[in-house]
Image (cartoon, coloured by chain):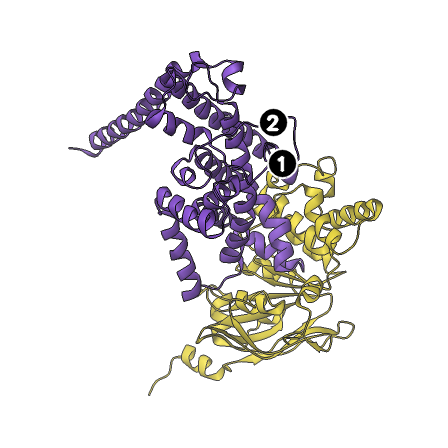
Amino acid sequence: MFMSSDVQRRTAMQERHVTQPHEAGHPIVLATEDLHVYYGSKEAIFEGDLQFAQNQITALIGPSGSGKSTYLRSLNRMNDRIATVKGRIMYRGVDINQPDIDVYEMRRRVGMVFQRPNPFAKSIYDNIAFALRLRGVTAKTKLDEIVETSLRQAALWEQVKDDLDKSALALSGGQAQRLCIARAIAVKPDILLLDEPASALDPVSTSQLEDTLLKLKQHYTIIIVTHNMQQAARISEYTAFFNQGRVLEYDTTSQIFTNPQVQVTSDYVSGNFG
Amino acid sequence: MNAKRQNKVAIGTLYGIAGLVVLILLALLGYILVSGVPQLSWHFLTAPAKAFTKGGGVGIQLFNSFYLLILAMLISFPIALGSAIYLYEYAKDNWVTNTVRTAIEILSSLPSVVVGLFGFLFFVVKLNMGFSILSGAFALTFFNLPLLTRSIEDSLRTIDPQQREGGLALGLSRWETITRVILPAAVPSILTGFILSAGRVFGEAAALIYTAGQSAPALNFADWNPFNISSPLNPMRPAETLAVHIWKINSEGIMPDAKAISSGASAVLVIAILLFNLAARYLGKRLYKRLTSA
């Protein structure tokens, strides 16, 4: 029997290849162990064992329906009423996938930004301040200060500082998404989850958003789902490749893009499918 | 027929139908206003009705209509709001909620005269509340609740689910998300539903004939103690509303100017509902601006 060189290479490659981060100075803040997610009786995530390093950006890539968003939404239990999540989600040594965890407090520490910008029908100021007020921050000076630093961190302050009392619904898509980031970081999270945050934005807004994320990683641990492989390559330190509900490969971003160990990853990052 | 021609014919037909609806509406409104407005005067709007002689007014009926409207809305709105929030935001989609929804649907198609007779048997007779504003308000609640619940539920449905996720992702509870994010955004739409149902309640007659009664005893507008029988605020007094009054003088009115009074009262009813709509719409916009700083 003949075997083409391509097929030989494929058989030589491993089916899965997961290297957890281990760089000094970036401890693991979040890790999933033996994670399974079910929609009814349908299993959507079969085994997600990933560790996330502090103050680094981790990108989750993979074709549509590969389970990367489902996985991300499980991390701060946004899937609670939608899906069944089994396994452990270890956040700084605590399994947050437990019924007795204060899920609201946990979500304050593990914030989330969504695919479509979803500013509330409130003023720009109140979009950021109202969650703080509900948590007992009522002093006007303190609120002003948090609103300003959050907007500065999200690189939106200069554009909106004179319009803080205007409706957030009047912002452009890119500005609205940065407001959503400011809103998320105002409650002082530890980890920021982003679910394809740039997919509804134009190229200029996307590149601004990427700059913002690169600055934000000094303060936060960022996990981002993206369809855009250039984006993953540009901003992330680690990349996980999802396919059909499984993590097929996890490694440093440069490894994934230059020297993938799994054939499917190689096909995906070189644009042969997906 | 080619596509372009077909399109033109379709548009023409639709314009025709829409025009017909507007025409009917205008003719109806025009007739009521033209025959009714000349009867209006300060005296007509404030004087009590007379049973046998000329020159009666609709003052008490007008007051009763508003008072009954306010009471009915005070009772039905909180219940409708609560059940709509429960049904849309909390309830799981199972046979229980489906049964509740079906029940609401059936209740909303109940003829109002049936609601009135039920109110008569239950509130007036069984609970011994007599012909009273309160009996009428409860009957109107039964009549109003299903539609108001449905319309509030629809208002909640128009709010993007992403808004809920946004609230939850900030660490807000579901209740905080609903009260601080969803309801403020839904206010204009909820208010529209509120206005529409208030208009229906204001013009409702059949459900009130057997519950709030057909008599309008003289009121002492200087006495605002709700426990006195002649006080306008007493909820246990019988109270004929404007709509019931129109029905009554048309079926058994023996005053010589019955037709004029009926026309005038109809005009008052229509104008009141119109003003009510406009004011509430304006308020809704103002409220939305304040809540959202749009």
> Is residue A104 or residue A218 the one in the foreground?
A104
Placement of B8 over or under A28, stated as above or below: above
A244 versus B210 height, above or below? below
Question: Can residue A273 be seen in the rendering of this structure?
Answer: no
**Chain A rendering hue:** yellow
Local packing at callout 2 (Cα closer than 10 Å; few below 14, some 14-19, many 20+) is few
Label 2 resides on the chain identified as B
Q: Is residue B170 above or below residue A46?
A: above
Circle 1 chain: B
User: Residue A160: x and y, percent?
Assistant: 71, 39
Residue that label 2 marks: B220
Between B81 and A232, the one nearer to me in the picture: B81
Q: Are marks 1 and 2 in contact (CB under 8 Å)?
A: yes
**B27 relative to B37 in the view: left or right:** left
Q: Residue furthest top?
A: B38
Residue B277 seen by the camera? yes
Determine the residue positioned at 38% across, 29% down.
B248
Circle 2: element type: loop
Amino acid residing under circle 1: Asn
Residue B73 bears which disc, if any?
none
Label number found at residue B228: 1
Residue at image coords 38%, 79%: A4
Rendered purple, the chain in question is B
Instruction: In the rendered view, tell whether residue A145 sits above or below residue A135.
Output: above
